[in-house]
Amino acid sequence: MKDFRIEQESCGNIQLIRLQGSLDMYSFPRLESQLQTLFQQGRYCLMLDCSQLDYIGSAGLGALIGFAKQAREHDGDLKLLRVPERIYKIVELLGFTKVLQVYNTEETAIASFQKP
Amino acid sequence: MGLDKQIDVKKSTSRLFVRAPGHGSSLRHIRTVITDLARQVGFPEDEVAKIEMAVDEACSNVVEHAYNANRDWSWKHRDPDIRLTIHTEADRLIIQISDNGKRFDFAAYRPGNIVDRIRAMRSGGYGIAIMRKFMDEVEYKSDDQTGNTIRLVKYLKKS
């Protein structure tokens, strides 16, 4: 059980946010604050690297949808990267993959932002 | 198990009792207890993940809604804790989650279809729908003696 951690780096105009630990209703406000700051800076192209996540609750998933919606309204998006299989099965089963795009590699995720 | 000192776990011959502060910091510890137990009982990992999420949604609702600081709790004189009683019967795992917080009109609540909410990109309101989707039985009761209790049941399906 890892503590929740967030790291951020830029890949050109895309922000890569690496998450570690559990994204639940307790930890989510920290990510929410970081995403709001990025939006205030006009950065709407976001990739969330989930490879080190061990849990995502509905509070986190629902809020990510809200952020993806806001990002798309500004010609950006919020995409998920390297979602662990255990989490992916739940996210897909619930239907969140119908609106949140998930990629297995950084390269394909970055390329998807560049498509017209 | 590496739990915080505030999390109290007791085991009798047939039941596991967990008492934790009604605070978000308790959630990951509760999930650890639940997932460990569900694996011991024999659920496959896909079902363990569903049980984990259903219990987390129930406990998150307690923290976010029942004990929301802006609301009047139903029983302010009692500890704002979350109490879990977990046991198995022949073919099922039964998890009861109790609190002393604000009552909820569970019977009247209609969360709607999860996929419809997702397609509409709604950011909240998934918790109870997820509990109903992932567990075989979900019941809620509230009374002055025991507070609010949500009862989650998952059947062990033998293949």
Image (cartoon, coloured by chain):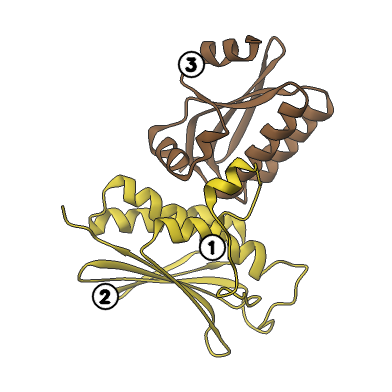
Residue at image position (63%, 82%) is B78
Q: From the viewer's perspective, is residue A10 above or below residue B30?
A: above
Q: Secondary structure at mark 2?
A: loop
Distance CA(mark 1)–CA(mark 2) = 23 Å
Residues at circles 3 and 2 in contact by the CB criterion of under 8 Å? no
Residue type at numbered disc 1: Cys
Depth check, front residue: B127 or B36: B127
Residue at image position (62%, 55%) is B125
Dot 1 corresponds to which residue? B59
Q: Position of residue B74 (x, y in %)?
A: 67, 82
Residue B14 shown left or right of residue A94 in the figure: left
Image chain in yellow: B
Q: Position of residue A113 (x, y in %)?
A: 63, 14
Res A105 label:
3
The mark lying in front, picked from 1 and 3, is 3
Dot 2 corresponds to which residue? B14
Residue at image position (48%, 16%) is A105
Drawing shade for chain A = brown
Q: Chain of mark 1?
A: B
Res A43 label:
none
Q: Chain of mark 2?
A: B
Q: Write down the quadrant of residue A87 in the picture.
A: top left
